[in-house]
Image (tube, rainbow, N blue to C red):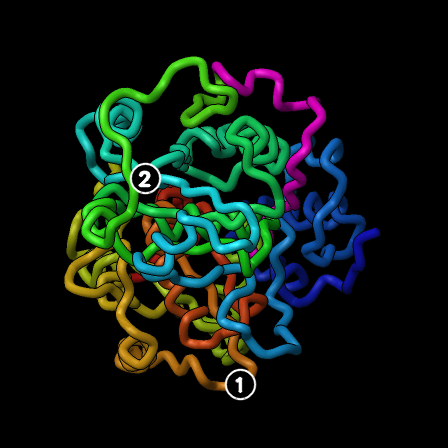
């Protein structure tokens, strides 16, 4: 039985759009969302797996948490390579699943990371490959947006195929330090309801793993395996929508739609909301509109009221997988005018396509921000920058 709370101002402010046409669009979106949720926002609790076969509705709101962060919650914990190696050898705790979540922005072959995992390696022994572009929502308006949060039913089916249960400890890793998607994959697992104490982003690459004595495999994946090590949704999970599942996912937590974010942007930009930060992980040039967007057809600039917070400032030695230590993270946020220790603050994270925003989310959690106070705008600049009706400043 899911608990409910009243819809906060995130929906009531939707009527303040800047044009009558857009006002109508946003009002319809708000009415649809309110009707879908029965006039309330549901608390982010897990629900029965047969129901998870329906497409999920994002239930993020900007209600502040009433409990302190445990440095985990929705955004999981970072784990050292040494600790990950020790867990592979067995520690008497929960079963462990190692997940290669590698994805490289701008790769000439979009399947390059998959092929490397399947055909060559090295890969962590027994690991599986999670493709953020394939295990994703591609229906309706999301069909034109990359790696959107998957429907919970699809995610459950993928976990069943991999042999990953709700009780597994999941360690996500990248095949090198330029792999961009490990924090995104971790946030996906956690947003789908996997236990916050059971999801970890490894702070190193496969080369670091090998140097630490971790076991690896090389060459093609073995054939005729009982469980999948790699999969494609269209081929391997064709019947996911309606099938029973063992793994039980939940509706995405703290994920905002464009309509919800629009109301937040208007309140922040007008000064009505002084408790919410909107943090943009893109480069300073893209934020200012002086550097081109890597995807065609998108306007340059940023959302009114947003703060430029390039994710690279949080990372160690130019890595995309290893973060700076906590004190350095806090200092980086402070340098951008973001007080992560202030009481009563909420944080919306965004970026180009919803990937590096998860670096910001992870960094905030490492600084002690409660998971309930961190919100991901999943559509990111791919959606916002492609909409001529939403406000953009340069």
Report x, y in % for residue 359: 35, 59
Q: Which mark is residue 124?
A: 2
Camera-side residue of 14 and 358: 358
> Is residue 238 a member of the stretch shown in magenta?
yes
Q: Which residue occupies the extreme bottom position in the image?
A: 342
Q: Secondary structure at mark 2?
A: strand
- Residue 223 as seen in the image, left or right of residue 289: right
Indicate which disc residue 370 carries: none
Identify the mark nearer the N-term, 1 or 2. 2
Read off the magenta span: 235-256
Q: Is residue 109 left or right of residue 197?
A: left
Q: Which of the pair 19/266 is nearer the observer?
A: 266
Query: Going 72% across and 58% down the picture, which residue do you hit?
Result: 43
Indicate the quadrant where residue 120 lies.
top left
Picture layout, residue 281 above or below residue 24: below
Q: How much space separates mark 1 and mark 2, taking CA atoms?
A: 41 Å
Q: Is residue 149 above or below residue 183?
A: above
Q: Residue at x 65, y 45 (%)?
A: 250
Horizontal and vertical percent position of residue 168 = 56, 46
Mark 1 sits on what residue? 343
Which dot, 1 or 2, sits closer to the camera? 2
Q: Nearer the viewer, residue 371 or 301?
A: 371
Magenta part mainly helix, strand or loop?
loop
């Amino acid at each position: 039985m899911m608990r409910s709370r009243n819809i906060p101002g995130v929906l009531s402010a939707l009527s303040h759009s800047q044009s009558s046409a857009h006002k109508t669009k946003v009002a319809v979106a708000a009415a649809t969302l309110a009707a879908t949720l029965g006039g309330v926002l549901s608390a982010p609790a897990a629900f029965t797996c047969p129901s998870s076969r329906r497409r999920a509705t994002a239930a993020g709101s900007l209600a502040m948490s009433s409990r302190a962060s445990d440095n985990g919650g929705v955004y999981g914990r970072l784990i050292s390579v040494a600790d990950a190696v020790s867990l592979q050898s067995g520690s008497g705790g929960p079963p462990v699943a190692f997940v290669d979540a590698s994805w490289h922005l701008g790769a000439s072959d979009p399947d390059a990371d998959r092929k490397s995992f399947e055909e060559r390696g090295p890969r962590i022994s027994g690991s599986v490959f999670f493709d953020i572009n394939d295990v994703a929502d591609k229906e309706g308006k999301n069909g034109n947006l990359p790696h959107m949060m998957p429907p919970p039913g699809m995610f459950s089916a993928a976990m069943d195929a991999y042999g990953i249960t709700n009780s597994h400890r999941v360690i996500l890793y990248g095949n090198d330090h330029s792999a961009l998607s490990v924090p995104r994959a971790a946030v996906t697992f956690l947003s789908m309801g996997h236990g916050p104490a059971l999801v970890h982003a490894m702070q190193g690459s496969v080369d670091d793993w090998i140097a630490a004595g971790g076991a690896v495999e090389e060459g093609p994946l073995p054939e005729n395996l009982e469980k999948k090590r790699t999969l494609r949704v269209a081929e391997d999970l064709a019947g996911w929508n309606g099938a029973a599942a063992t793994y039980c996912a939940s509706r995405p937590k703290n994920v905002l739609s464009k309509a919800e974010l629009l109301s937040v942007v208007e309140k922040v930009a007008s000064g009505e909301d002084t408790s919410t930060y909107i943090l943009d992980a893109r480069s300073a040039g893209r934020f200012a509109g002086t550097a081109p967007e890597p995807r065609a057809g998108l306007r340059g600039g940023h959302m009114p009221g947003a703060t430029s917070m390039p994710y690279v400032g949080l990372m160690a030695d130019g890595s995309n997988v290893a973060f700076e230590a906590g004190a350095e993270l806090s200092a980086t946020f402070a340098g951008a005018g973001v007080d992560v220790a202030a009481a009563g603050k909420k944080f919306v994270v965004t970026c180009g396509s919803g990937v590096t925003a998860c670096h910001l989310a992870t960094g905030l959690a490492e600084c002690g921000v409660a998971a309930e106070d961190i919100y991901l705008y999943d559509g990111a600049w791919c959606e916002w920058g492609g909409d001529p009706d939403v406000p953009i400043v340069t």
